[in-house]
Amino acid sequence: MLATSSHRRRPRNAPRDDGPERLHVAVLMGGVGHEREVSLRTGRAVTDALTEGGHRAEGWVLEGDRDEALDALPRGLDVVFIALHGDYGEDGRVQRALAERGLVYTGSGPEASARAYDKLRTKRILARAGVPIAPDRVLPFPFGPRDLRHVLRLVPAYPVVVKPARMGSSVGVVVCRDRQQVRRALEENARFAQPQLVEEFVPGHELTCGVLGREALPVVEPVPAEGTYDYRAKYDPTAGTRYGIEPETIPAAVRAEVRRLALVAHDALGLSDLSRVDFRYDPARDRLAALEVNTIPGMTATSLLPKGAAAAGLSFPRLVERICRLALRSGVILATLMVPSQVYLLSQYQIVQALGWLDTVAGIVAPGLFSAFAIFLMYVAFRGLPNELEEAARLDGASPVRTFRSVMLPRVKPSISGVVITAVLWSWNDLLWPLVV
């Protein structure tokens, strides 16, 4: 059975995705990332909501990032709800491990998750798709004093935002208003051991839009009581953060554009079922800029995607059930390979992995074959050449021009054709093979 691009497989006895059947769901939470506490809150909220909706939900707290821990999941699960944030949650590794075990899970597949988790890759992909982004400078990791000085020289104006490339929940995000603040933020964030972005600060409004299935949810504007929309403003119910749903202070055309761009970003990254895209809007310049794309949005009491879903008429229990049923629907059966008394189920991940092995073999064997083919063409074209040159020189009076026309030219033409054919074959791995994979 081949899975869809989300790399998930639907069990043979799985319930329908649109029916009232009671689901058996394992909710993965905890993990090893810096957002572990947020994950635990999300996991507990999802577990309670599924139970309230009449489903059998079991919370599974992961203490590490070893795939073997997933082998303890109960048999007969309909869906694994991924409530993990950060490393071994949004980076594609747990999705790959679940896919290898033939388990249906919520959200996007391993490759799409890994793309969206990396802000550098995400911004480049979004820019190619026509989604506006804020300009940035990148500090690699590890970095030395020269790298740091180079990045600081490239900052055109202040304020700027320093942020790690692979982190969420505003962890490591600092708004800097001068060179010294940038240097201090970059040095402190070195503990995350990853590249960092020094991004232009876009003043104005923070806007966010969730995507559920193929629908863009209402736009939500978080308005912190003070300062920026940082970790405390996001997760502390006492922080005083207010939330505007389709806020009237934002022009209707801008809100419509946010919803459109959220779907464009979702599709450009190859995401499945749900995501949340965060933007900044500068009304003075009528400018939108996408900041990041979240593949596993928070599901806490203060989280943004549930607020957008509620505005669209989906209560929290109905929202998490909808996400589970979207996962089941994405596990569509594409093909079945029948063997006597057994059914072998293959995920698209396994197919792509097999193609990768074939590509490796081709990369080793093909150059030798193509080189041998080129040598053979040259041999066929130029065999017997010394005797013919001697005969041509005798008949043409040793004229170089006549000798070239009568002997060499008929051989050079097919040789050039052979070289062109060989070059085309040689470029298989670089030009044609990626189209197959």
Image: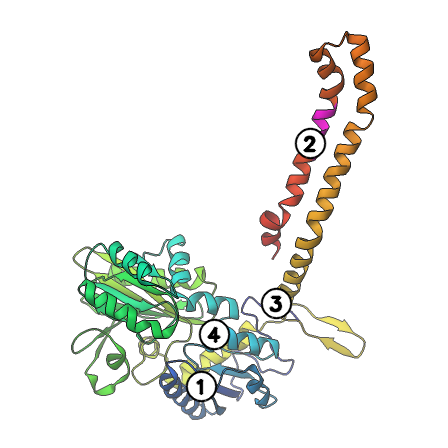
Label 3 Cα crowd, 10 Å radius (few <14 / some 14-19 / many 20+):
many
Label 2 Cα crowd, 10 Å radius (few <14 / some 14-19 / many 20+):
few
Q: Dot 3 corresponds to which residue?
A: 348
How much space separates mark 1 and mark 3, taking CA atoms? 26 Å
Q: Amino acid at mark 3?
A: Gln
How much space separates mark 2 and mark 4, taking CA atoms? 51 Å
Above or below for 299 versus 217: below
Q: Dot 1 corresponds to which residue?
A: 29
**Residue interval drawn in magenta:** 411-418
- Whether the residues at callouts 1 and 4 have beta carbons within 8 Å, the answer is no
> The residue tagged with tag 4: helix, strand or loop?
loop
- For the C terminus, the image quarter is bottom right
Tell me where residue 278 appears, x and y as whole percent. 32, 68
User: Which of marks 3 and 1 precedes in the sequence?
Assistant: 1
Give the residue displayed 37% in from the left and 60% down from the top.
123
User: Which of marks 4 and 2 precedes in the sequence?
Assistant: 4
> The residue tagged with tag 2: helix, strand or loop?
helix
Label 1 Cα crowd, 10 Å radius (few <14 / some 14-19 / many 20+):
many
How much space separates mark 1 and mark 2, taking CA atoms? 61 Å
Q: Is residue 216 magenta?
A: no
Report the predominant secondary structure element of the magenta stretch.
Answer: helix
Q: Nearer the viewer, mark 1 or mark 2?
A: 2
**Viewer-closest of 29 and 21:** 29
Q: Amino acid at mark 2?
A: Ser
> The residue tagged with tag 1: helix, strand or loop?
strand
Q: Dot 4 corresponds to which residue?
A: 107
